[in-house]
Each structure stands twice: as structure tokens, then as C-alpha cells.
Image (cartoon, rainbow, N blue to C red):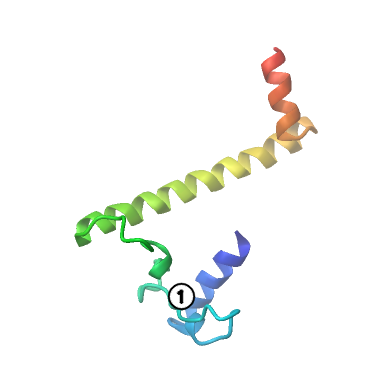
Amino acid sequence: MQFAELKRWQDFKYPGSQAKQYFVGLEAVMGGSGDPAYPGGPWFNMFNLGGKSEAEMKKLKLNEIKNGRLAMIAVFGYGAQAVLTGKGPYENLLDHLAD
């Protein structure tokens, strides 16, 4: 996760820079979408399964960002639970199911 966010931050500071530095032959793919605030690029709609119109693609991009934020909150919850209970997520789940 940190790797992707650092690449995004570098591209935000210097738009298009990620397509110029060497990255195991994937420089063209790392070029992004041209919008520094949203990296996207060829990886987002690789097989053209998304909507055909710009409005549909905009909705899919927004959904992707919302789902990513929700996933980050969930991972934070795992960590907070581990700190508060002193147990890992699996052990907490087993305790919950046994209750």
C-alpha cells in the first residue's frame, strides 16, 4: 500500500514523472491517467469492462476511491483491535464466535 501511495505522491508533485523513471519495464503503464489527482491510467479499465461514457467512468472511479478508503479504515480497525485486546484479528474472531 505504501509503495502505491508513494508513487502516486511522486506523480502528483511531478506529473508524468513515473513514466520516465525505470520500473522493471512498466514505465509506459506507470504514466497514469494524465490527472495527477487520480492516477488510474491503463490499469483501471484494462479490459474495457467499465462504462463506455465519461460519466460512467467517473462514477466507477469515485466508487473505487470510496472502496479504497473503506478498506483503509478496516485495516486500521484490525490494528486498533490488536492494540486494545493484545490479540490478533483471527484470535479475536474465534473469541467472538465462541461467545
Residue 21 lies in quadrant = bottom right
Residue that lies at the very extreme toward the bottom in this rendered image:
20
Disc 1 crowd rating (10 Å Cα; few below 14, some 14-19, many 20+) is: some
Q: Is residue 43 above or below residue 23?
A: above
Horizontal and vertical percent for residue 50? 30, 55
Q: Is residue 57 above or below residue 63?
A: below
Horizontal and vertical percent for residue 33? 37, 72
Residue 90 lies in quadrant = top right
Q: In this view, does 79 lie above or below 40?
A: above
Residue marked by disc 1: 29
Horizontal and vertical percent for residue 20? 50, 87
Residue that lies at the very extreme toward the top in this rendered image:
99
Left or right relative to 92: residue 26: left
Residue at 76% x, 35% y: name it: 88
Left or right relative to 91: residue 72: left
Front position in the image: 93 or 44 = 44
Residue at 74% x, 33% y: name it: 84
Left or right relative to 98: residue 19: left
- At label 1, which amino acid type do we have? Val
- SS at mark 1? helix
Front position in the image: 80 or 27 = 27
Horizontal and vertical percent for residue 41? 39, 70
Residue 96 lies in quadrant = top right
Total marks drawn?
A: 1
Question: Where the N terminus falls, by quadrant?
Answer: bottom right
Residue at 28% x, 52% y: name it: 59
Residue at 39% x, 62% y: name it: 44
Residue that lies at the very extreme toward the front in this rendered image:
47
Question: Where the C terminus falls, by quadrant?
Answer: top right
Q: In this view, does 56 lie above or below 34?
A: above
